[in-house]
Amino acid sequence: MGTPAKFAVTAAVLVAVGAAGWFGGRPAVERVVHDYILEHPEILPQAMEELRRREAAKALAGVRQTVETPFPGATLGNPNGAVTLVEFSDYACGYCRQSLPDVAKLIAQNPDLRIVVRELPIIGPQSPDASKMALAAAEQGKYAQFHDAMYQAGQVDGPTIEAVARKIGLDMDRARRIAASPTVEAEIGRNMELAQRLGFTGTPSFVVGDKLIPGAVGFDGLAEAVKAARGR
């Protein structure tokens, strides 16, 4: 049904609802709305999308700036990009690893895209150690190198974290000091609180524009969300 026809139907429904409300009260109004939905089920996906958008906006209210402000250096893509995508990730997460090519493709096709990575170490017993070393790498300007190399390593344990850190050329004494610092500890705690506030219970989870995206949705899903954020 085209837009003019939809408008006409909607107008007719509003008139019917008004009449029903005047003559029959709430039961009559509910019956008119019920019948309209049955006759036009195509409005349900639109309604659900609008509901999700409103719930996301409500969850982001008051914390968007915090969510989109990275730990210094913990970004991928264009650090000064006009569009921001936030990813909550864990190095022990297989789905995060599977998403790497999608994120890389997204960066390649969107030169104005900044990806803020929020370390959310919730899966493995040594996930926190990997996340802390990642932030130590960010402090030395080598976050992207550690991020990619750690996922490519395929496992998360003490020797692997150490090997990856040495491989990318970190100053290890400095890295260990930063990884154990209150600043890094506070960042991890903040990420946990933000994830809870946004309703994220797993990784990867994404925030872009007014969308909250739990789970690995693939390149097309992320690209569509980035496009929508650019136009908001």
Image: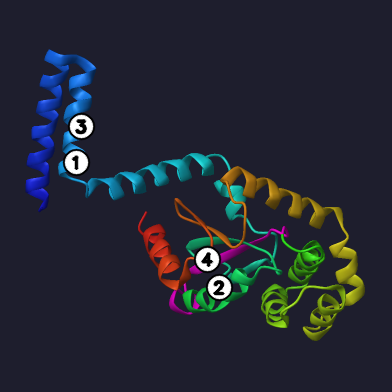
Question: Regarding mark 3 in the picture, which secondary structure is present there?
Answer: helix
| Residue 179 position in % (x across, y down) | 84, 64
Question: Which comes sooner in the sequence, label 1 or label 4?
Answer: 1
Residue density around tag 3, few if under 14, some if 14–19, many if 20 or more, within 10 Å: some
Describe residue 69's horizontal placement relative to residue 127 as left or right: left
Residue density around tag 4, few if under 14, some if 14–19, many if 20 or more, within 10 Å: some
Question: Regarding mark 1 in the picture, which secondary structure is present there?
Answer: helix
Question: Regarding mark 2 in the picture, which secondary structure is present there?
Answer: helix
Question: Which comes sooner in the sequence, label 2 or label 1?
Answer: 1
Residue type, numbered disc 4: Ala
Q: Residue at x 16, y 29 (%)?
A: 32
What whole-number distance in Å separates the C-alpha atoms at marks 3 and 1? 9 Å
Residue topped by disc 1: 38
Residue topped by disc 2: 99
- The picture quadrant where one finds residue 97 is bottom right
| Residue 192 position in % (x across, y down) | 70, 50
Residue that extends furthest to the bottom in the rendered view of this protein = 167
| Residue 155 position in % (x across, y down) | 75, 77
Residue that extends furthest to the right in the rendered view of this protein = 173
Residue type, numbered disc 1: Leu
Residue type, numbered disc 2: Ser
Residue density around tag 1, few if under 14, some if 14–19, many if 20 or more, within 10 Å: few
Q: Is residue 229 magenta?
A: no
- Per the rendering, the mark at residue 216 is 4
Residue topped by disc 3: 33
Q: Residue at x 53, y 44 (%)?
A: 60
